[in-house]
Image (spheres, helix red, strand yellow):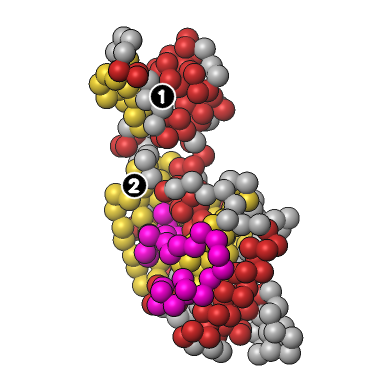
Amino acid sequence: MDLTSLRSHNDRTVLRLVRSGALSRASIAAEAGLTPQAVSKIVARLIEAGLLEETGTVRDGGRGKPRTSLQLAAGGAYAYGAYVDRDELRVVKLDLTGEVVSTSSAPLAPMFTPSDVLDALEPLVEVDEKVLGLGIGIAGPLDFRSGVVSPNGLPGWSSVPLRALAEERLGLPVVVDKDTNAAVLAEAWRRPLRDAALVFVGTGLGVGLLLGGEVHRGARSGAGEFGHTTIQLDGPLCVCGRRGCVEAVHATTTGVEAARVLAAAVTNLVQLLDLDQIVLSGRKVLESPELYLRAMPDVDVSVTSYGPDLVPVGAGLLVLGELF
Ligand SMILES: [Zn+2]
């Protein structure tokens, strides 16, 4: 699907408003500060492209003349999202509303190579004209702009041009981002988040940061390496070569003590960035969420509601989100 003509600022504004519930052309015009004529033209174009549909009539405020209401055409466009985890590739297909329409996965053998990932990916992604692209979430470090990755913990993966390789193999636009950034995008799709951290506690420990409503990637796409901030001078040796990193200290503790270690580090993060929402996720947290929730600082703390689809959904939203 060629959407290049539909990516103007006003098109995105209209799609965003319809997604958030501004239902009629008149209410869209009022919200967007556009003339009714301009909105009519944009809406006609979006209906023509199959992204919006008319659903019936509403009466604004119960009075006045009935207006035709609009909604996103769920089947108008799709995006795939993939998560390259340490032992599994997980793929979801999202419709235009961000709902998961299918999920699939393939095992990844220990020491898997980039070719192994592409081989696993290819049969799980069906390319057609309505598919906008594929987002891939993977451990950092990586360069968001070039899609070149050197993920921690994957031997042999050094400066792999994953985006280019996947585009060539699949014939589809591809976006690559850190798994934690994808995860925080997924959370922000479901509910309003503005200054928030998604804390991901798996094999490693990282955060996806949303500052002022935008994903914060930093100068070299390196933001969020929360697991490698020091909380114990002369503490245990970390995989990164330094001592006393949160990740290393957390890994040497269990139960309540592990939760306390994480909570201390999260408290530092909240203090530093003035965050008001923390979302906990990852295998370790999902094993004993109550333990972690109880230890956290006094801000709005919750556990992700996505389960294992968190990163793949967020990866798909990297693509879909460009329409909004
Ligand atoms: Zn470290």
Which of 268/141 is in front?
A: 268
286 or 182, which is in the foreground? 286
Foreground of the two, 197 or 132: 197
Residue ID at (61%, 75%): 264
Tell me the amino acid under the disc marked 1.
Answer: Leu
Q: Position of residue 196 (x, y in %)?
A: 57, 56
Q: Confirm whether residue 324 shows in the render.
A: yes
Percent from the top left, x then y, of residue 208? 57, 60
Instruction: Look at the picture and state if 220 lies above or below 254.
Output: above
State the residue position of label 1. 46
Label of residue 218 in the image: none
Q: Is residue 9 highlighted in magenta?
A: no
Residue 70, image x, y percentages: 34, 25
Q: Of the residues under marks 2 and 1, which one precedes in the sequence?
A: 1
Disc 2 residue type? Glu
Instruction: Give the residues drawn in magenta, as a range.
Output: 288-313
Which secondary structure lies at badge 2? loop
Give the residue displayed 45% in from the left and 80% down from the top: 110
Residue 308 magenta: yes
Q: Position of residue 164 (x, y in %)?
A: 56, 54
Q: Residue furthest left?
A: 56
- 323, above or below 142, in the image: above
Residue depicted at x 62% and y 69%: 267
Residue 156 can be seen in this image: no
Mark 2: C-beta under 8 Å from nearest atom of ligand 1: no
Residue drawn 46% across the image and 67% down it: 281
Q: Quadrant of residue 122?
A: bottom left
Report whether the residue tagged 1 is closer than 8 Å to ligand 1. no
What residue did someone put label 2 on? Answer: 99
